[in-house]
């Protein structure tokens, strides 16, 4: 029997995942979202992003139907799935959230608080879940979200900068030029000089993107209560998703779940962290290490 939506659900310790683009947050969210206590923005509410369509979150309940939810292939278009709902973010906030600059607590004015809280509540109501999980990439937005959700739990997904850079080089929407592929405000002058000195090599710009966002993430997380932050090394996650999810579940204070464990075991996670070793030539590898070698060491990635 399908439970009717609650009239006004409580927003309890929302789980906010973030990281650099191409950093593994999509795969991480895909796995974490299988916990039966979690609601999320879906592919449907992303595509039909006006608030009038928030009841489409009800479709996400399909995944909990016995004998049906687990039988629907995840890749089918009709299968509700969590996603980084950038179209929804833009529509909700008039572009304020997705603008290419950091956001402070002061940017979370009363209007923003109302927008975000109503969106989370609506999706919890229609999805019929007690907790909400969301993810975004780019700037961390911790200060902004804490002003709206003081009890938020942040999960920072970190991935080796060489894997991130290589992934950027292999997507068709990133061409490696400052004009079309730099979306992070004014570049650090030292980084700009580094890029120019390389002859504007795309692999160098990819490395600069990674270290710029990683340092932003580190700075914001340093200001957050340590009890509200958790770091996931993507390499450790893909090596043993179940063990990592046990740790994440404990941190998020989610109950143990046989359904969750069963679903995780069925997910095939492809580990592409070493793909950069095959894809990049020796010259690119050398340039990339010159660009991010110090940062790789700083963030405890194996050199």
Image: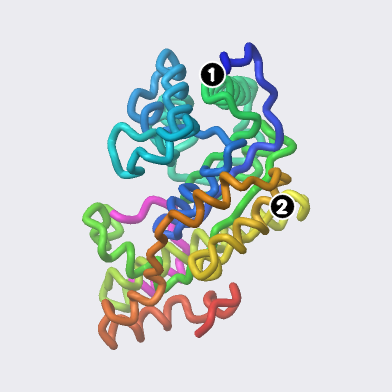
284 up-or-down from 250: above or below:
below
In this rendering, does residue 52 appear at all? yes
Question: Is residue 134 rendered magenta in the image?
Answer: no
- Indicate the position of residue 53 as horizontal and vertical percent values: 40, 17
- Indicate the position of residue 190 as horizontal and vertical percent values: 46, 71
Numbered badge on residue 251: 2
**Colour mode?**
rainbow
Question: Is residue 182 rendered magenta in the image?
Answer: yes
In this rendering, does residue 192 appear at all? no
- Indicate the position of residue 255 as horizontal and vertical percent values: 70, 44
Which residue position is annotated with label 1? Answer: 1
Choose between 39 and 139: the one closer to the eye: 39
Q: CA distance from mark 1 to mark 2?
A: 31 Å
Choose between 79 and 55: the one closer to the eye: 79
Element on which disc 1 rests: loop
Query: Magenta span covers which residues?
Result: 181-195
- Indicate the position of residue 59 as horizontal and vertical percent values: 42, 24
Q: Is residue 272 left or right of residue 127?
A: left
Q: Residue at x 74, y 38 (%)?
A: 151
Look at the numbered discs 1 and 2 and tell me whether their residues touch, using CB distance below 8 Å.
no
Label 1 neighbourhood size at 10 Å, few (<14), some (14-19), many (20+)?
Answer: few
Choose between 134 and 70: the one closer to the eye: 70
Q: Residue at x 35, y 38 (%)?
A: 72
């Amino acid at each position: 029997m399908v439970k009717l939506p609650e009239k006004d659900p409580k927003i309890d310790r929302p789980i906010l995942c973030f990281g650099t683009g191409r950093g593994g947050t999509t795969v991480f969210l895909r796995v974490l979202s299988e916990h039966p206590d979690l609601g999320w923005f879906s592919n449907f509410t992303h595509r039909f992003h006006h608030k009038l369509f928030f009841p489409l979150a009800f479709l996400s309940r399909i995944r909990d139907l016995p004998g049906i939810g687990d039988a629907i292939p995840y890749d089918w278009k009709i299968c509700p799935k969590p996603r980084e709902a950038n179209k929804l973010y833009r529509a909700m906030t008039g572009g304020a959230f997705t603008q290419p600059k950091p956001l402070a607590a002061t940017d979370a004015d009363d209007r923003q608080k109302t927008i975000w809280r109503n969106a989370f509540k609506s999706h919890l109501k229609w999805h019929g879940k007690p907790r909400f999980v969301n993810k975004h990439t780019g700037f961390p937005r911790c200060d902004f979200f804490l002003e709206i959700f003081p009890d938020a739990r942040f999960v920072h997904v970190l991935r080796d900068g060489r894997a991130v850079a290589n992934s950027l080089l292999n997507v068709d929407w990133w061409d490696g030029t400052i004009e079309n592929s730099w979306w992070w405000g004014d570049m650090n002058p030292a980084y700009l000089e580094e890029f120019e000195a390389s002859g504007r090599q795309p692999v160098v710009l990819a490395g600069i993107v990674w270290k710029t966002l990683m340092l932003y993430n580190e700075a914001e997380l340093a200001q957050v209560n340590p009890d509200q932050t958790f770091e996931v090394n993507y390499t450790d996650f893909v090596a043993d998703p179940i063990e990592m999810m046990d740790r994440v579940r404990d941190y998020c204070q989610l109950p143990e779940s046989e359904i969750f464990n069963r679903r995780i075991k069925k997910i095939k996670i492809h580990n592409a962290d070493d793909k950069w070793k095959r894809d990049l030539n020796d010259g690119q590898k050398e340039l990339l290490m010159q660009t991010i070698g110090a940062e790789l060491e700083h963030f405890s990635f194996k050199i």
